[in-house]
Amino acid sequence: MFKHQVSGDSSLLRATEVFARTFYQPEVETVSVPLTSLDNWVRKQVLSLGPEVLIKLDVQGYENYVISGGQETFRQAKIAIMEAHLDYLFEGQSSFKDLLISLDRLGFRYAGNLAQSYGEDGHVVYVDALYVK
């Protein structure tokens, strides 16, 4: 994991120059962290998900990887809220279009933004997108 020393923007993906220009040049420490899929984590917790599951992801560009490893969990969910980057902030990040396609395949439709963040020039850098079944 690329642990940013100054903020909570750490990610499993390396920050790009666009990130540095938009926010700050991160001072990064590389740390090892255990990984598992969302579906495996849910099974390990012995969680019985009810009929009204909401998934909230803010994983700094790693959204499609989480979706890929969380197919069962996403099939049970009714709502998903995800931070989606419109600018290329992390190497290999999921694009907004990638998320639309992945979630559409799981029965979700895009229902708007709950919030969005702007760059200094006024363009939208990332959004908290809402998807519903």
Image (tube, grey):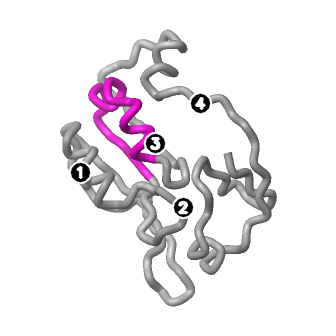
Q: Which quadrant of the structure image shows residue 115?
A: bottom left
**Residue lying at 54% horizontally and 26% vertically, measured from the top left:** 36
Q: Name the residue tied to disc 2.
A: 90
Label 3 secondary element: strand
The residue beneath circle 1 is 101
Question: In percent of the image, x 77 and y 58: which residue is there?
Answer: 28
Per the model, the C-alpha gap separating discs 3 and 1 is: 18 Å
71 with respect to 23 (left or right) = left
Q: How far apart are the alpha carbons under marks 2 and 4?
A: 19 Å
Local crowd size for mark 2, using a 10 Å CA cut-off: few (<14), some (14–19), many (≥20)? many
Hey, what amino acid is under mark 1? Answer: Ile
The residue under label 4 is: 35
Of the residues shown, which amino acid type is indicated by label 4? Leu
Label 1 to label 2: alpha-carbon separation? 20 Å
- Label whose residue precedes the other's in the sequence (2 or 4): 4
Q: CA distance from mark 4 to mark 3?
A: 18 Å
Q: What secondary structure is found at the residue carrying circle 1?
A: helix
Task: Tell me the residue that label 3 is attached to.
Answer: 56
CA separation in Å, label 2 and label 3: 19 Å
Q: Nearer the viewer, mark 3 or mark 1?
A: 1
